[in-house]
Image (tube, rainbow, N blue to C red):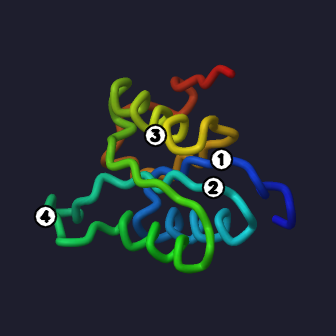
Amino acid sequence: MGTMVAGKVVVVTGAGGGIGREIALAMAANGAKVVVNDLGVSLTGEKADETAAEKVVREIRTAGGEAAISADSVASWTGAEKIVQCALDNFGRIDGVVNNADRKSTRLNSSHVALSR
C-alpha cells in the first residue's frame, strides 16, 4: 500500500475478524486512521466481555495507530449513517470504505450507500 492510505480515514466493515480484521490492521500499519466496524457478537449472537472490534482497535493502538469502534449494522440506513458519523466524530472526515461485512448480516448492497463530501 505504501503511502496510499497514510493520513486517510477508512471505515472497514466486518473488521472484527477474518479478512476485515486483516484489512483494518494493514490500513493502520500503512498510516490510515481506521473505523473498525463490527456488530460485536458471535455468529450465534452471543456477546463477549471484549468484542472482536475492541481487540482489533487495541492491536492498532498498541502498534501506534489510530482507530475507533463502530458496532452499528450496515444492514440499515440508520446503522450506515451512524458508521459514517463515527468516522466524522472521531477523525473529522471519511476518505474510504471497505465493505467487508458478512452478507448474512447485511441487507443493503454497497451500491445503495453514497457518501458525499
Q: Position of residue 48 (x, y in %)?
A: 18, 70
From the top left corner, tell me how far across and down residue 60 is, in percent.
54, 71
| Alpha carbon distance from label 2 to label 4 | 28 Å
Which of the labelled discs sits on residue 9, or is there none?
A: 1
Residue 16 vs 115, above or below: the answer is below
Q: Residue at x 53, y 71 (%)?
A: 61
- State the residue at coordinates (65%, 65%): 28
Is residue 111 toward the left or the right of residue 117 in the image? left
The crowd level at tag 4 (other Cα within 10 Å; few <14, some 14-19, many 20+) is few
The alpha-carbon separation of the residues under discs 4 and 3 comes to: 24 Å
Identified by mark 1, the residue type is Val
Q: Which residue is mark 3?
A: 86
Q: Name the residue carrying label 2.
A: 33
Give the alpha-carbon distance from disc 1 to disc 2, as whole Å: 5 Å
Front of the two marks 2 and 4: 2
Q: CA distance from mark 1 to mark 3?
A: 11 Å
Badge 1 crowding class, 10 Å Cα cut-off, few under 14, some 14 to 19, many 20 or more, is many
Q: CA distance from mark 4 to mark 1?
A: 30 Å
Residue occupying image coordinates x 39% and y 33%: 82
Q: Is residue 57 left or right of residue 114?
A: left
Can you identify the residue that label 4 sits on?
46
Lateral position of residue 27 relative to residue 66, left or right: right
Query: Considering the numbered disc 4 on the image, is that residue within a helix, a strand or a loop?
Result: loop
Q: Are the two marked residues, 4 and 1, in contact with CB atoms closer than 8 angstroms?
A: no
Instruction: Residue at 75%, 67% (x, y): give it.
Output: 30
Q: Amino acid at mark 3?
A: Cys
Amino acid of disc 4: Glu
Sequence-wise, which precedes: disc 1 or disc 3?
A: 1
Image quadrant assignment for residue 73:
top left
